[in-house]
Structure formats: structure tokens, C-alpha cells
Image (cartoon, coloured by chain):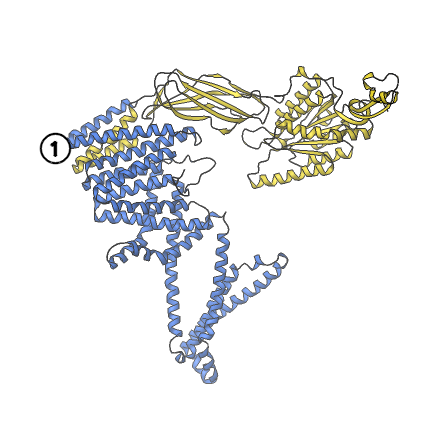
């Protein structure tokens, strides 16, 4: 059940057994969010805390959309997942480096909010994480490939542009011939590739397809031969040029010099390359449209979305991070580049850590989200204590973690016992109010003890005594729990 | 018995982590924070769960006995007659394994104050047989949900759902077999509907004399009515293996629905004075061509014997190698001019071919086809289209074919299928000139 807006989870006929019931999860979310906001306010880093919310939301939306089937959802999921997740990881690492105690607090909060948000979206499980890791990895590889391709293309275009816009009258005939042959070879290859992917066969009536296939086969053979001959001509021309063969040709046949010199004219090379590029571009668009309109092929859509998203990341990510990272321009550029290069791998490692936790049993498979949220609040408690946040806020942090785990585990148990159809709000509210009440009493008692400790004992920590007390209580619990 | 749950292992780990970090950093608030998970561990662990003996349950099943396919409402009431509040009570009713819940839920979770009652209401679809409910399972959790006690609760009231083919039909003893018959013919004679008048003959009943005619003309005349005659009807149940399909889990098979419809139809035919024969196609029986065949007859005994055949058809799991031959064999068994009532889901072409053959041999045919195909899948929709085509083929051949959709009450389907066809059957019989009864008045 969504709180508002379109739902990110995928309700099924089986039901939402994978997450706690809505009432329990609402109680956990409200308590955690209130404590996070209050601790941020008490510690003086409320704006940073709230900024986490945007990144967590973006990351969760991305994670949810990456578990869909359609291309558009997967593409948007890639954008949200990589941008939000990279930002979240980068933000946490940056604050941990600059101020470790506050970094711990914010990392804990990020974990807690992410755990709850992904639980709401019903994607805090190993299967969803594997899917997201695969697609995140694919888009990262795609981004690198696109980056290399764009550099190569840009370099080629620049070289050609320099060559063509240079003093045209001074182009010697032999280099002109070799450039022409190279362009012919490239254009032939592009046309040969394009004719593979253009939907000639699909657009032809069924009775004419055999004839078309024969014609197309001959045409592709011709283009392949032309490309090979042109490539051989390039090699032969280079060798002949080095051996001085062209000088004897020009001496024997003077008009050939003028003809070869005119072959590198923009009026010749332009249309030649334009044909090849146009055919290939049309074929790529046709191929992409066919893939996009094939909704049932989930894996193909995932790969296509990763490839397209990789291009978007190559073009947009650095400017995006540059625009949102604060600081000096040089620092912003460095941080943006680092985020682009290191962010996705770090996100991948975080995902692997979650999977590892589930595999070894540290994180329960069905309650991964609440466990992460609770663990995050424990981390935040440690950080808040080290950062010198008021003790009540420290106690509230760990209490919120315990409440989140208590009511979430209870809600999961109710669903496991009764399924998702029966109305159990009264049962959940009773348990939730009881859990929150216990927390309030404990926080009040601990605040009093801490006040006493600081007022009477001057903040002395009787470590061994408290440790003994904790161990004794734990030992006592063993027989009590049977 | 109270069993502890292991929800707080993470809490114990958090306590240890906070205590160690607090000690290592000599940080008082962190060290004190270690108490919080400990408090929750204690809160979840200290309370125990004991099931009070004053927890009572009662169940009603309505209606029982029920016919196959009929929605049955089940209501389970659990009352806390003890003097303490039960903070977490979860109840799961013991639904019979062969049945499926179609609406509502047999589970509930709530808190129960002293004297408070919780009610579960759910609906199942009946299948033939006697289905025993298991006792409801009750799970009680302690205040912090750290311990649970589970037990089966004794239940008052209904403990089984009985589903019979002849449920909602009149008892055998009430079957009136002394009716003349309901099919109206064009032949003049005894009956209810006016046909014509003729000159009085000696021996005519006094109550057939047209006294108005006598008052006007001074001569006696006798009123002729449209004669009612009994007919021979062959009820054919298609019990082949292909028909043993269900539209969903826990639903009755098509053969069960056929048997249910045939039971009621045969009861109605016999009550109105027709002779009824029964044939079960698809099983290896002792009759001709392996048919389970009941020759035409009437009365209470015939109805009882027909019910036995239908129950056999609904329960049988074996099949015969060549059921199409049994369809053909019926041509030799059915009395001349008999009306054939075929009960089949029409999931293949064999019954359609049989209908066309019967019609070609001048039998009037009515097809009642229970719908057991779901349309929520592409293959289901495809089968729906094919079945619709078969129904259309039956109609085009001259049969009266009725699609008995799920949710349509059987009496409505029977009324539509058979009552409206009576005139058609009568005309065929009149044409054949082989009626069972004779009018005597020409």
C-alpha cells in the first residue's frame, strides 16, 4: 500500500508477503524519520540530513524501476539508480573522510532511510538487488565503451575536419587518393552493416521475400567486395607511395594527378560518407525500435536500457555532478569525475555487501530492509555519541532502530501467519504503541541516569562495572528465554 | 505451551556492539545506549504466552448439504470468555483440503478483551462429497510477541460440509409420478389448453360438454383440448477424461456440474411424467459399447437408479478407450423419437459430432453445457472461442444449446433449456406419430 502517489512495488495475486504490513511499516517509518530529523536538528546538520532524503528517494525509485520489464521504466530506473546511488555513496564517503563522527551519523541515517524506503517498495531482497547490480554494472561498462567511442569519433571527425578545411588546393594527389579509398572502405562497411539491420524483409510482402533476399544478398556481397577492394587499395597505395610508384604514374599519365587530387574534395567525400552514416543510423534506429517494442524480452530491454543509459551518463553525468557538488570549480570538477569513475563501482560493492549479508545469514532474506534500517540506526547511534550530539538524541537513535525492527518483524510475522487479506490494523497498532511506549520509558530512564552521571559523578564512565552488568543481564536472559 | 521466538538476536548483537564501542571510546551515552536493545530483548522475552481454556469457537456452514458449484458461507466465531485481555490472537480455520476459499479469509488476527468476540466469514465453492473441517488453529502471542502458544481449538456447530448432487431437489418420497406429462401436442384430447369442439358422442365426460353451445343451439358438443403426452428422454452425461477439468483450485469438475444438472433435470422429467433413460459416456460400464445405460422408465426407483449413475460419473477416475463409439451406440439404444438431453462442457468436437448424428436420426436434442473455462489467460480465451463455436455448431445443426455460465442458478438454466423446448419436441413426436399416449379423440 503506498502512502501517496503511484506505487513502486509490484502487487501480485500472491500478495506482498515480502514486506511488513502497511500499518507496522508506517509506525516504523514515522518513528525513524522523526528521530532522524530531530537528531539532525539537535546536532546542527538538519539540512544535510534532509538532503539524504532526496538521494534515498532517487535511489529507491531507480531500484524499483530496474525490476520492471519495459524499456522506458528500465531507462529511467538506470538514471535514478545510478545518480541517486552514486550520490548517496559519494556523499557518505565524503563526509566520512572529512568528519568521521558525522559521517557515521549520516551513513547510519542513509542506511536506515534506504532500508525503510526499499522495504516500502518491496525491493529489499536479494533478487531485486541482483537485478539492479547486473544492470548497474552493464550501464557502467556501457558508459566506458561510449566514452572511448566518443573520443575516437571526435578525434576522427576533428582530423577529417582539419584535413578537409585545410588548404584544399595543396592536397597532394596521392594522400587524396588514399583518403578517398579509406572513406570508400568505411562507407562500404557501414552500408554492409546497415543492410543487416534494416527491416527490408519485414516490410516486404511474404511472396516477394525470396526475391528480395536474393537481391539483398547480391547487394551486400557487392558492398563487401567494394569495402575489401578499397581497403586493399589503401594498403597498396601506401606501399606504392613509399616506393615512389605514383611519381612514375603521374609522369606517364599527367591527368591522373589532377583526378586523384580532386577525390578528396568535400563534394566527393561528403556524399560518400553521408550515405554510409545515414544507412547505419537508420538501421540502428530501426533495431532500437524493434527492441523497445518487444516488451516481453526483459533481458534484451535491460541491456538496451543499459546501453542507452551509458550514453546518457557519458554526456550528462559529469555536468550533473558538477552542478550539484558545492565548492570551488576545480574541486567540483575533481569530485564530479571521481563520482563518475568511482561511484558506480562503490555502489556495486555496497550491493555485493548486502547480498553477502543475506547469503551468510547476517541479514534475513525476508526482512532485509528492516534489518538494514535497524543496523543503520545502530551505526548512527555510535556516530551521534562520538559527535557529541545531546545524549537524549543518542538514546532516541538506538530506540528508533529497535522500534523499527520490532514492529517490522512483527508485521512480517503477521503476514506470514495470516496472509495479506485479513484486516489486522488493531493488532499492529496495539503492538506498535506498546513498542514505542517501551522506548519512551527507556529513553526517559536513561536520560535521568545520564543526568545523574554527569551531575554527580562528573561524567565518569564506570566501564568495567557496566560491562559486567551487561554480561550478567545477557546471561540471565538465557534461562529466561528457555 | 509457550514457545520463545528468536526475534531479538539482532538486539543482543546491538547491545554487545554498543557496549564494546562505548567502553573502547569511554563514551557514556554510547555505553548507556546499550541498555536500550537490552530493554527490548527483556520486553520481548520475559512475558509468556498461555492459551486460556475459556477461549471458545463455533462454526456455521450455510447451506449444507449444498449442490456442486454452489457458494457456501462459513462463519467462525471465537469468543474470549476468560477474564484477561489477549493482546495477540491469530486464528486460522481448518478449511477442508479439497475446497478452496473464493471470498473472504479463513484467518484473522486481533486483540480480544474479556467477553469480546471475533468473527471470520468466508465463502467456498462446494464440491461433491463430505468434507470435514479441521479444528481452527489458534496462536496466542505474549505481550512483546517474544513467545507464542499454538493449539487446536474445539469447535461447536457445523464440522463438515456435505455436497450432494440432489441437494435442493425434492426428497424421493415426494416425487409425484402420476402426472400425465407436460409436453403439449397438436392432437385433440384431454388437457388444459383449448383446441376445438366436436359433436358429442356417447361416453364423453360431462365436464367436457360445451354448455354454452348447448344453450345457444340446443345440441350437445364436446370440447377438445390440446393433449398432454409423456415423452421419452435420454439424459446423456459426458464423463470422458477431457471433461474432468476445473475452472480453478477447489472448484467442482465439469463432470460434477453435469451430474448435478442431470440429477435435477431427470428429477423434473420424472416428476412431470416422462420416461427417462440415462447414459454415461466415457466410463467402462456393463452396458452396450461399455456404456453405463439405464433403460427408459419412470417413478421413484428410476430416479434413485439415475442418481446412482450420476454419482458414479462424478466420482469415477477411469476412462474408456473409444468414447466416441459410445456416442454412436446411443442411436441404437434411444427409443424412436426420444428427446436427448446432453450434458457436456463441449471441450472437444466429439459431442458436437454426436449431436449432429442424433439430429440426423430425427431425435430432438438439448445441450446443457457447463462453462468451466477461465478467460484470464490467452489459452483460456482461445478455448472459450472454440467452445463458443461448438455451441454455435450445435445450434446450427438444430439442437437447443445452452451455455450454463458460472453464477447462473441451475433452475434458471434448466427452465430455459428444457421448458422452452417442449413444443419443439412435441412437434417432432407428433410428426413421428409414435407418441407414448394416445388421444383417443380424432
For the C terminus of chain B, the quadrant is top right
In which image quadrant can residue A330 be found?
bottom left
Supply the letter of whichever chain is blue. Answer: A
In terms of secondary structure, where does tag 1 sit? helix
Query: A92 or A20: which is nearer to us?
Result: A20
Q: Quick check: A369 above or below A466?
A: below
Q: Quick check: A169 above or below B371?
A: below
The residue wearing badge 1 is: A455
The residue positioned 36% from the left and 44% from the top of the image is: A60
The residue positioned 59% from the left and 60% from the top of the image is: A213
Q: Is residue B370 visible?
A: yes
Supply the letter of whichever chain is yellow. Answer: B
In the rendered view, does A107 fall on the left or right side of B184?
A: left
Query: A305 or B119: which is nearer to us?
Result: B119
Q: Position of residue A441 (x, y in %)?
A: 24, 29
In the rendered view, does B245 fall on the left or right side of A339?
A: right
Q: Position of residue A372 (x, y in %)?
A: 32, 38
Which chain does tag 1 point to?
Answer: A
In the rendered view, does B46 fall on the left or right side of B31?
A: right
Amino acid at each position: 500500500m503506498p502512502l501517496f502517489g503511484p506505487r513502486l512495488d509490484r502487487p501480485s495475486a500472491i500478495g506482498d508477503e515480502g514486506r511488513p504490513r502497511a500499518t507496522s511499516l508506517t509506525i516504523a517509518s514515522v518513528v525513524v524519520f522523526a528521530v532522524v530529523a530531530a537528531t539532525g536538528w539537535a546536532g546542527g546538520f538538519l539540512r544535510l540530513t534532509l538532503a539524504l532524503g532526496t538521494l534515498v528517494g532517487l535511489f529507491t525509485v531507480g531500484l524499483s524501476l530496474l525490476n520492471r520489464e519495459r524499456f522506458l521504466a528500465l531507462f529511467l530506473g538506470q538514471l535514478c539508480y545510478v545518480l541517486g546511488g552514486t550520490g548517496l555513496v559519494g556523499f557518505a564517503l565524503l563526509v566520512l573522510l572529512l568528519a568521521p563522527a558525522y559521517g557515521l551519523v549520516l551513513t547510519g541515517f542513509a542506511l536506515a532511510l534506504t532500508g525503510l524506503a526499499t522495504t516500502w517498495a518491496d525491493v529489499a531482497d536479494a533478487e531485486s538487488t541482483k537485478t539492479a547490480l547486473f544492470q548497474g554494472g552493464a550501464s557502467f561498462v556501457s558508459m566506458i565503451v561510449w566514452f572511448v567511442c566518443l573520443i575516437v569519433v571526435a578525434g576522427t571527425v576533428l582530423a577529417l575536419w582539419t584535413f578537409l578545411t585545410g588548404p584544399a588546393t595543396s592536397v597532394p594527389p596521392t594522400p587524396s587518393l588514399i583518403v578517398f579509398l579509406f572513406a570508400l572502405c568505411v562507407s562500404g562497411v557501414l552500408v554492409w552493416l546497415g543492410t543487416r539491420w534494416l527491416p527490408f524483409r519485414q516490410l516486404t510482402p511474404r511472396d516477394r521475400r525470396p526475391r528480395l533476399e536474393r537481391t539483398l544478398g547480391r547487394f551486400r556481397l557487392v558492398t563487401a567486395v567494394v569495402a575489401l577492394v578499397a581497403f586493399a587499395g589503401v594498403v597498396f597505395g601506401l606501399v606504392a607511395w613509399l616506393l615512389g610508384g605514383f611519381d612514375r604514374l603521374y609522369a606517364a599519365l599527367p591527368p591522373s594527378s589532377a583526378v586523384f587530387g580532386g577525390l578528396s574534395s568535400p563534394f566527393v567525400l561528403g556524399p560518400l560518407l553521408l550515405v554510409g552514416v545515414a544507412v547505419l543510423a537508420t538501421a540502428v534506429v530501426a533495431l532500437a525500435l524493434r527492441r523497445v517494442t518487444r516488451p516481453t524480452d526483459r533481458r534484451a530491454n535491460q541491456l538496451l536500457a543499459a546501453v542507452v543509459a551509458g550514453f546518457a551518463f557519458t554526456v550528462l553525468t559529469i555536468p550533473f555532478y558538477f552542478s550539484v557538488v558545492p565548492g570551488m570549480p576545480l574541486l567540483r570538477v575533481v569530485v564530479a569525475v571521481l563520482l563518475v569513475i568511482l561511484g558506480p563501482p562503490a555502489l556495486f560493492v555496497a550491493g555485493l555487501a548486502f547480498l553477502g549479508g543475506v547469503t551468510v545469514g547476517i541479514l534475513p532474506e525476508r526482512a532485509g530492509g528492516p534489518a538494514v534500517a535497524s543496523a543503520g540506526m545502530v551505526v548512527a547511534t555510535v556516530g551521534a555519541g562520538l559527535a557529541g550530539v545531546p545524549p537524549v538524541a543518542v538514546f532516541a537513535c538506538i530506540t528508533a532502530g529497535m522500534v523499527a525492527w520490532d514492529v517490522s518483524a512483527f508485521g512480517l510475522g503477521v503476514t506470514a501467519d495470516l496472509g495479506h487479506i485479513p484486516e489486522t490494523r488493531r493488532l499492529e497498532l496495539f503492538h506498535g504503541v506498546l513498542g514505542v511506549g517501551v522506548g519512551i520509558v527507556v529513553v526517559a530512564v536513561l536520560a535521568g541516569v545520564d543526568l545523574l552521571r554527569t551531575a554527580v559523578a562528573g561524567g565518569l564512565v564506570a566501564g568495567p562495572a557496566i560491562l559486567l552488568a551487561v554480561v550478567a543481564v545477557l546471561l540471565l536472559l538465557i534461562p529466561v528465554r528457555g | 505451551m509457550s514457545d520463545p521466538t528468536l526475534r531479538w538476536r539482532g538486539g543482543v548483537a546491538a547491545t554487545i556492539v554498543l557496549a564494546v564501542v562505548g567502553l573502547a571510546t569511554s563514551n557514556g551515552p554510547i555505553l548507556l545506549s546499550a541498555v536500550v536493545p537490552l530493554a527490548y530483548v527483556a520486553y520481548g522475552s520475559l512475558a509468556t504466552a498461555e492459551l486460556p481454556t475459556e477461549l471458545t469457537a463455533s462454526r456455521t456452514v450455510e447451506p449444507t448439504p449444498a449442490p456442486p458449484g454452489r457458494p457456501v458461507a462459513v462463519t467462525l466465531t471465537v469468543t474470549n470468555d476468560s477474564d484477561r485481555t489477549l493482546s495477540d490472537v491469530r486464528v486460522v480455520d481448518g478449511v477442508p483440503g479439497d475446497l478452496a476459499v473464493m471470498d473472504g479469509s479463513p484467518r484473522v488476527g486481533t486483540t480480544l478483551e474479556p467477553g469480546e468476540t471475533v468473527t471470520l466469514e468466508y465463502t467456498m465453492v462446494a464440491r461433491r462429497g463430505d468434507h470435514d473441517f479441521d479444528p481452527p488453529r489458534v496462536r496466542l502471542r505474549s505481550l512483546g510477541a517474544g513467545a507464542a502458544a499454538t493449539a487446536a481449538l474445539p469447535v461447536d456447530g457445523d464440522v463438515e460440509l456435505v455436497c450432494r448432487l440432489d441437494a435442493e431437489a425434492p426428497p424421493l418420497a415426494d416425487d409425484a409420478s402420476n402426472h400425465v406429462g407436460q409436453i403439449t401436442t397438436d392432437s385433440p384430447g384431454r388437457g388444459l389448453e383449448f383446441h376445438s369442439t366436436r359433436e358429442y358422442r356417447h361416453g364423453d365426460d360431462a365436464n367436457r360438454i360445451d354448455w354454452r353451445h348447448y344453450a345457444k343451439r340446443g345440441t350437445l358438443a364436446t370440447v377438445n383440448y390440446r393433449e398432454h403426452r409423456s415423452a421419452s428422454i435420454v439424459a446423456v452425461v459426458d464423463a470422458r477424461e477431457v471433461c474432468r477439468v476445473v475452472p480453478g483450485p477447489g472448484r467442482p469438475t465439469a463432470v460434477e456440474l453435469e451430474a448435478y444438472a442431470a440429477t435435477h433435470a431427470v428429477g423434473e422429467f420424472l416428476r412431470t411424467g416422462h420416461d427417462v433413460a440415462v447414459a454415461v459416456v466415457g466410463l467402462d460400464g456393463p452396458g452396450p459399447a461399455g456404456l453405463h445405460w439405464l433403460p427408459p422408465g419412470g417413478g421413484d426407483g428410476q430416479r434413485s437408479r439415475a442418481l446412482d449413475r450420476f454419482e458414479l460419473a462424478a466420482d469415477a477416475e477411469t476412462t474408456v478407450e473409444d468414447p466416441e463409439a459410445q456416442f454412436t451406440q446411443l442411436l441404437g439404444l434411444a427409443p424412436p423419437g426420444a428427446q436427448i438431453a446432453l450434458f457436456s462442457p463441449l471441450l472437444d468436437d466429439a459431442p458436437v459430432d454426436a449431436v449432429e448424428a442424433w439430429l440426423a436420426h430425427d431425435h430432438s436434442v438439448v445441450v446443457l453445457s457447463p462453462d468451466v473455462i477461465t478467460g484470464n489467460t490467452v489459452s483460456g480465451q482461445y478455448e472459450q472461442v472454440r467452445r463458443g463455436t461448438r455451441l454455435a455448431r450445435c445450434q446450427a445443426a438444430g439442437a437447443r444449446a445452452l451455455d450454463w455460465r458460472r453464477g447462473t442458478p441451475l433452475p434458471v438454466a434448466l427452465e430455459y433449456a428444457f421448458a422452452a423446448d417442449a413444443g419443439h419436441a412435441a412437434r417432432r413426436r407428433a410428426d413421428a406419430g409414435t407418441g407414448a399416449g394416445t388421444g383417443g379423440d380424432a
